[in-house]
Image: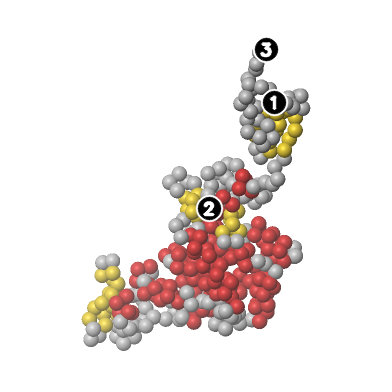
Amino acid sequence: MSYASYQVATDGAPANTSNLIPSGPPRATYNDQPGALSLNADGTTSVQKPLGFNTADMAPAGATGILATARTPLGSPPVNGIQPTDIITVNGMELTVAIAEHMGILQRDVSGRYAEATGGVDRAREGADAENRGTETVDTAEAFSDPKAEQALSEVCSGVSAGLQVSALQEIIASGQATPQTINRAASEAGVEPSEMDARVSGVMKHFETQAMQAVKGYGSEDPAAFFEWAREHQHRGLKTAMQAHGMERSTRGYEPMYREYVASMAEHDPASVPNAKFGGGITAQDVGDKVLLNIPGKGQMTYRTALKAGLIKVGGA
């Protein structure tokens, strides 16, 4: 009598390592995740389907943290690396990768790949908290002078989620307008046509712009547009912060310190305007090399910035 030795896997039982063939049809099983395909000894097959699907399996290869939530605008996982137009979820907010980079949540490494910036998620959470505190700051918020403008803003915000409002604001700060994708999503949430939502958002943007211009005029400026042009070039980060506070906290206070610096640096960014200015009190100005000096009776010569800081001159109409 001869013996044959087999080692096969059975349903949940340990492998039989005896020299006797076990009774019943043995089954050879291999794992074909996420399901399992079983090949029976009689030639038949059976498939055990998985109980569920883990969305983590859709994460971009090698992505971790918030980048693991990345998806294309159509909802599929990125297959050729994460792109600026892809969408990620940060603290419950959906943002495009480009906006997340602009907000300082993401950054590019030396290879040009996206990575989380240190502290970026915390900054995003602070921004969301500021949005959620809207009801707490209503007493100190700066309302539009036109009640119809307030109504228009209320109509936009009432039907759109806070996260999407923040996304739209960041896009407007970055490029001057919300993307069509954001407008479409906002329209879907509010139950209106995209063209109507686009008109609403554009109208609200104009009200915010007018309010910002009026605030700078209140500081003494006769040409607020020139100030904002300077701020975009020389105070980009500060202007971004001020615009965020304006949109989320309804406060224009952030523009004032930048305007004071704009006036104080007039001799640097617009030196030709200083010698022609009328200071009064016998004060005159002259170019000395790369500086503009003021001759102040009883005080001698000093730079324009020093005289302004000391309160010896006042500048209006900048």
Query: How many angstroms separate mark 1 from mark 2 (CA)?
Result: 50 Å
Q: Which residue is mark 3?
A: 1
**Residue type, label 1:** Pro
Q: Residue at x 66, y 22 (%)?
A: 20
Earlier-in-chain disc, 1 versus 2: 1
Q: Residue at x 71, y 31 (%)?
A: 38
Earlier-in-chain disc, 3 versus 2: 3
Mark sitting on residue 22: 1
Q: Residue furthest front?
A: 1
**Residue type, label 2:** Gly
Residue 286 appears left or right of 262: left
Question: Are the residues tagged 1 and 3 within 8 Å (C-beta)?
Answer: no
The image quadrant that residue 136 belongs to is: bottom right
Q: Residue furthest top?
A: 1
Of the two numbered discs 1 and 2 in the rendering, the one whose residue sits closer to the viewer: 1
Q: Label 1 crowding class (10 Å Cα cut-off): few <14, some 14-19, many 20+?
A: few
Query: How many angstroms separate mark 3 from mark 2 (CA)?
Result: 63 Å
Q: Residue 19 appears at what percent x and percent y?
A: 63, 21
Q: Nearer the viewer, residue 304 or 252?
A: 252
Q: Which residue is mark 2?
A: 65
Quadrant in the picture for the C terminus: bottom left
Of the two numbered discs 3 and 2 in the rendering, the one whose residue sits closer to the viewer: 3
Mark 2 element type:
helix
Q: Residue 153 appears at what percent x and percent y?
A: 65, 74
Q: Residue at x 68, y 77 (%)?
A: 151
**Residue type, label 3:** Met
Query: How many angstroms separate mark 1 from mark 3 (CA)?
Result: 17 Å
